[in-house]
Amino acid sequence: MGLLSPNITERANAFFSVHGIPVGPKLWGHGSDSVVASGLAHHEMGVDSKENLALARQYQSALFDAGLAWLSGPVEFGGSDFSRSEVEQFRSIASNFTTIDASVFMIGQQIIAPAILAYGSGSQKKKYLRDLYRGSLIGCQLFSEPDAGSDLASLRCRAQKVEGGWQITGQKVWSSGAHWSDFGELLARTNEDLNLRHRGLTMFLINMKASEVTVRPLRQMNGNSHFNHVFIDNLFVDDSEVLGPIGNGWDVANASLKSERDLNPADAGLFLDISNRLLELSQTLGPQSSIMRQELAGVITREKIAVWMRDSLKVSGTNVSGVSSSIMKLYESRSVWKIAQLAAQILGPRIVADSGAWGTYAWSDLLLGAHSQRIAGGTDEIQLNIIGERGLGLPREPR
């Protein structure tokens, strides 16, 4: 971790002493038995969610005022410019406390903000970055479409140049948190020549509260409705809201996609220490077969490998390190799927029939939600293509 900073320790402990609750012993059978966090949990767009959103904004504002919201960001835009060891030190302290759920800001802060920082104009950085980390703004991605998911370059949402800006019409799908968002990062086609594919796309920052934008929730098989279908009907977007050069939207999109793939699923507000919970489940339900014990050992082994692999890829300096985000995203999505399958084997019918027993049916959320990790941020198949073609130099897949 490097040298510890007394300043970080003092600031973090001072903040969490007011805004956090110390984490006590995690005892089987006590407290919530959920294995998924807010990103995959059941929640409705009703009064309770609005109240939770207000609490999240208050918490995020306090975190920002304490200088602890954007740990590694540049000071001029509200960051703290912490070193990597200082960031790890802060996270270590934060893990000892339970706080208000502020994952509603994750997409804007962890996925959109890096693209704005890399490609945004000076005015865009001032307009969005500080407020994203203060909690005043919530952002969402508007990339995928009903007929343009894995093949994102085939999208049909159009942006037509008009005086002073652009008129945008189209639809987007699988937009997480769009129902709460203030603005969206939208990828649209600005050149009608479909042969241009990637080169005919431009990125925009749009007002999600505009009357020309309609958001409809999509109900998933686990009951969650944080995904949305978004319809844009002749929305005017000022020239000042073009993110990056016109026709360079694909590079901007990749900046956001890389940030999304770099996210650890636990940090993204998706899962709650599922490997250890799986071990507890196995121990509680009694002895397992030798094959099952080997599978459980494999879960812990994969978790350790993920940590070492992430660190190794950061310093390898090879072509493969250039696709490290895809490697880690693919590895971790498969690890989550293996845990879900193993939990189903251990539980049997108890994972699909709610008997009220603590720590059993709760795993159904993971089993039903694990599929999304093989799709979000680019499907497993897309990651394999990226690794093979860009990292290993293999021939392109026939089209």
Image (tube, rainbow, N blue to C red):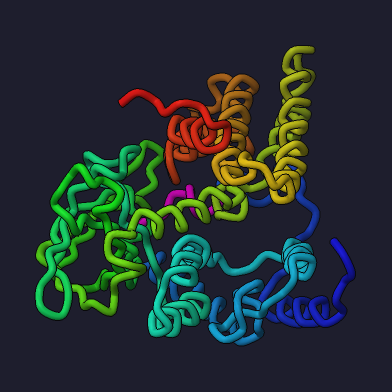
Q: Is residue 258 left or right of residue 228?
A: right
- Per the picture, the main secondary structure of the magenta-coloured stretch is loop
Q: Is residue 43 magenta?
A: yes
Name the residue nearer the viewer: 187 or 332: 187
Q: Is residue 397 left or right of residue 39?
A: left
Magenta stretch bounds: 37-45
Residue 90 falls in which quadrant of the image? Answer: bottom right
Q: Is residue 250 magenta?
A: no
Name the residue nearer the viewer: 397 or 272: 397
Quarter of the figure with the N terminus = bottom right
Horizontal and vertical percent position of residue 194? 18, 44
Q: Is residue 134 left or right of residue 225?
A: right
Name the residue nearer the viewer: 51 or 252: 252
Residue 82 falls in which quadrant of the image? Answer: bottom right
Q: Look at 30% across and 26% down and name the residue there.
A: 399
Q: Does residue 122 appear anywhere in the picture? A: yes
